[in-house]
Amino acid sequence: MRSQEARSSSSCAACKFMKRRCTPHCLFAPYFRADEPNKFAKVHKVFGASNVTKILNEVPEPQRQDAVNSLVFEAEERLKDPVYGCIGAIASLQDKMFQLQHDLAVAKARLARCSSRASYASCSTTSPLMMLDGEFGLTSFDDFMVVDQGGLTTDFRQHPFP
């Protein structure tokens, strides 16, 4: 754990940023090292030092590094995208997952069609989308829903943003 490691005599990034003297019991020092000044600057700009202090004081010490990592990620995403912040990053990842699931469904359909045919040559000329239309009755991926192992259904027609 970083908080129990010996520190050098230099101030942490937080104390340098706020132009104050870094004490041996500084709350920020284990998480905002002196060689990462931008890390605290981003968190400070989005959340403010007093709010970060309150958050770190409420979080149990073994979980503080994870909390700081989360704050840094959220601050970076908020600075990149002031409107949506990390929700925009999540939506982007969901879009990517949607596309990959679509590609997987197409590949599985093609594999099923190829394995059921006697000749591979006839399989290599068939369009994957035509195979989806023919085998599964899907005219587009808008009708695609995923059911996970717990029985929950995910409808990928919905998008969090217009």
Image (cartoon, rainbow, N blue to C red):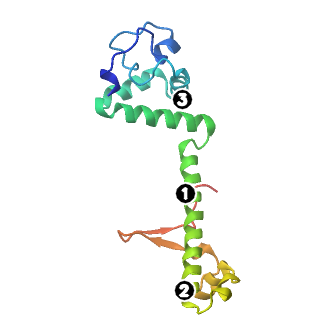
Q: Secondary structure at mark 2?
A: helix
Q: Can residue 134 be seen at all in this image of the molecule? A: yes
Q: Secondary structure at mark 3?
A: helix
> Is residue 50 left or right of 113 when viewed as pictured?
left
Q: Amino acid at mark 2?
A: Ser
Viewport quadrant of the N terminus: top left
Mark 2 or mark 1, earlier in chain: 1
At a point 64% along the width and 76% down the height, the residue shown is 140
At a point 38% along the width and 22% down the height, the residue shown is 30
Cα gap from disc 2 to disc 3, whole angstroms: 55 Å
Q: Position of residue 49 (x, y in %)?
A: 46, 21
Q: Is residue 88 above or below residue 135?
A: above
**Residue with the most extreme bottom position:** 118
Q: Amino acid at mark 3?
A: Val
Task: Give me the disc on residue 94.
Answer: 1
| Residue to which mark 3 is pinned | 46
Neighbor class of circle 1 (other Cα within 10 Å; few <14, some 14-19, many 20+) is some
Q: Amino acid at mark 1?
A: Gln
Q: Secondary structure at mark 1?
A: helix
Cα gap from disc 1 to disc 3, whole angstroms: 25 Å
Write down the quadrant of residue 79 in the picture.
top right
Q: Are marks 2 and 1 in contact (CB under 8 Å)?
A: no
Q: Can residue 60 be seen at all in this image of the molecule? A: no
Mark 2 or mark 3, earlier in chain: 3
| Residue to which mark 2 is pinned | 115
- 1 or 3: mark nearer the eye: 1
Q: Is residue 147 above or below residue 96?
A: below
Mark 1 or mark 3, earlier in chain: 3
Write down the quadrant of residue 99 in the picture.
bottom right
